[in-house]
Image (cartoon, helix red, strand yellow):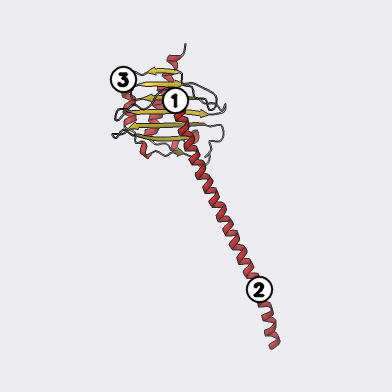
Amino acid sequence: MKQGNTSVRMWVKPALVLLALCLALLAAILLMRGSITLSGNNRAASSNSDGVNAEAAVAAALLENAGLSLPAREGAWLIVSHSGGGPAGKSDAAVVITSEGNVAAGGPSGPGEFRLPCKAHISADELRKFEQIVLSADPINWRGRYIEPASPDGCCDQYFYMLEFQRRKPDGTKQIQAASWYDSSAFLRPRDLISIHEAAVTIKNDALKKCQP
């Protein structure tokens, strides 16, 4: 009987050691997975932040090229609309429109090039219609980016769109809201963003036609 108990004790200790090793290995695997997930989330946050900064830089460059800025009066507004990418990898077009009726538009240009040589002034009737669309919008509720999970990076050769809304607040500061999207995620946009973008594109196309020789 004593011999049997001794044999059991001889096996128990190695079994406990093996169990402890297995638990340690499992804990290490779980920690590694947690670290990988965290790193991925950090990369996504960084990428989104970089994207927003890049879009703000594009809007700033377009305004500089257009020679336009948000008017100083209370309630004044300004719209910057830009599209790029596509199969050719070139900018499609851009337009800047102010509440004073000033318009600057540009056609295709090279990547990173912002040319808005076409200057125009829309009629009072056109401005009134566009302003109704602009002032009825609620940009504070726009998302910074509209992303379709199946194609978060706009694959493949989709066009990329960006629209920035600026408005002069009563205290004189600027309210700036921007949104961007790809062809595949356009359906996610709210109705007011769609309306402003479509109207801005119409104004851009009309301005470019007038600038053609």
Residue 154 percent across, percent down from the top left? 53, 35
Residue 192 percent across, percent down from the top left? 37, 33
So how many labels did they put on this image? 3
The residue depicted at 55 percent of the width and 24 percent of the height is 110
Mark 2 sits on what residue?
15
* Alpha-carbon span between mark 3 and mark 2: 87 Å
Mark 3 sits on what residue?
125
17 in relation to 144, above or below: below
The residue depicted at 43 percent of the width and 22 percent of the height is 66
161 in relation to 14, above or below: above
The residue at the far bottom in this view is 1
What label does residue 47 carry, if any?
Answer: none
How crowded pointer 1 is (Cα within 10 Å; few <14, some 14-19, many 20+) is rated as some
* Alpha-carbon span between mark 3 and mark 1: 27 Å
Residue 111 percent across, percent down from the top left? 54, 27
Ranked by sequence position, the earlier of labels 2 and 1 is 2
Front residue of this view, candidates 189 and 104: 104
For this view, does 14 lie left or right of residue 51? right
For this view, does 104 lie left or right of residue 10? left
Q: Quadrant of residue 204?
A: top left
The amino acid at mark 3 is Asp
Asked which secondary structure carries label 1, the reply is: helix
Mark 1 sits on what residue?
64
Front residue of this view, candidates 57 and 86: 57
Ranked by sequence position, the earlier of labels 3 and 1 is 1
Residue 137 percent across, percent down from the top left? 34, 33
Asked which secondary structure carries label 3, the reply is: helix
